[in-house]
Image (cartoon, rainbow, N blue to C red):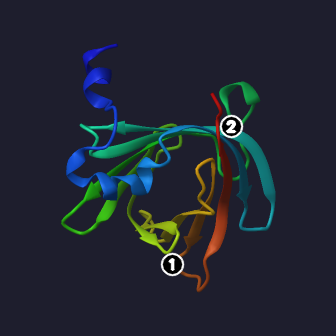
């Protein structure tokens, strides 16, 4: 393992904020996913993918990698495009929330959001470079599954639109 990998990865949550860190820490591990992208015109496309979560930065953050579709599963994913990106989720005790950064260099998509628990769910909210609102939610969370919703509200529209729907299941073994 390189020094970067050794210094980046952590074995678990930092004890200083261990309880708060479990909001996303419960996802640490490997997941299989079914992703449905929805076009503004109502078209739907579904593809398999994978998601990997891990502790990083002395256990003060959770980082994940989302791959859609899996490299072996073929060509470009219509509507949403192929994802091979990473999220860095850092708990900020000064605002009692998470600062979230998504980076997908292949599609040149970069997002900043703030994440908080909302009842049993986790809701992340932010704004795109064009001024559209984004809302990404983890719902129906269990030990072995979650439902993730990627919504957008264009500045010129009154309603939220579901753009991406992900059903994830934890890999066994």
**Residue farthest toward the top in the current orientation of the protein:** 1
Disc 1 crowd, CA 10 A, few/some/many (<14, 14-19, 20+):
few
Front residue (pair 154, 95) = 95
The residue tagged 1 is: 155
Q: Nearer the viewer, residue 19 or 60?
A: 19
Q: Quadrant of residue 152?
A: bottom right
Residue at the image point whose x is 18% and y is 66% from the top: 94
The percent position of residue 161, horizontal first and vertical second, equals: 65, 73
SS class of the residue under badge 1?
A: loop
Image quadrant in which the N terminus is located:
top left
* Residue 7 spot, x, y in % from top left: 25, 26
Circle number at residue 57: none
Are there few (<14), some (14-19), or many (20+) residues within 10 Å of tag 2? many
x and y, in percent, of residue 66 in the image: 55, 41
The numbered disc on residue 69 is 2
Q: Where is 105 relative to 164, above or below?
A: above
Q: Residue at x 31, y 43 (%)?
A: 13
* Above or below 4: residue 108: below
């Amino acid at each position: 393992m390189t020094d970067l990998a050794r210094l980046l990865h952590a074995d678990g949550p930092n004890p200083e904020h261990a309880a708060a860190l479990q909001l996303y820490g419960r996802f640490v591990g490997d997941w299989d996913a079914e992703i449905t992208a929805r076009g503004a015109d109502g078209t739907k496309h579904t593809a398999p993918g994978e998601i990997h979560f891990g502790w990083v930065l002395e256990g003060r953050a959770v980082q994940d990698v989302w791959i859609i579709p899996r490299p072996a599963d073929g060509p470009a994913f219509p509507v949403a495009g192929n994802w091979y990106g990473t999220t860095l989720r850092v708990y900020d005790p000064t605002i009692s929330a998470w600062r979230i950064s998504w980076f997908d260099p292949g599609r040149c998509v970069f997002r900043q959001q703030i994440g908080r628990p909302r009842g049993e769910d986790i809701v992340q909210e932010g704004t795109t470079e064009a001024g559209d609102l984004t809302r990404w939610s983890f719902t129906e969370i269990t030990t072995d599954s979650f439902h993730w919703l990627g919504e957008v509200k264009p500045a010129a529209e009154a309603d939220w639109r579901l753009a991406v729907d992900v059903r994830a299941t934890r890999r066994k073994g």
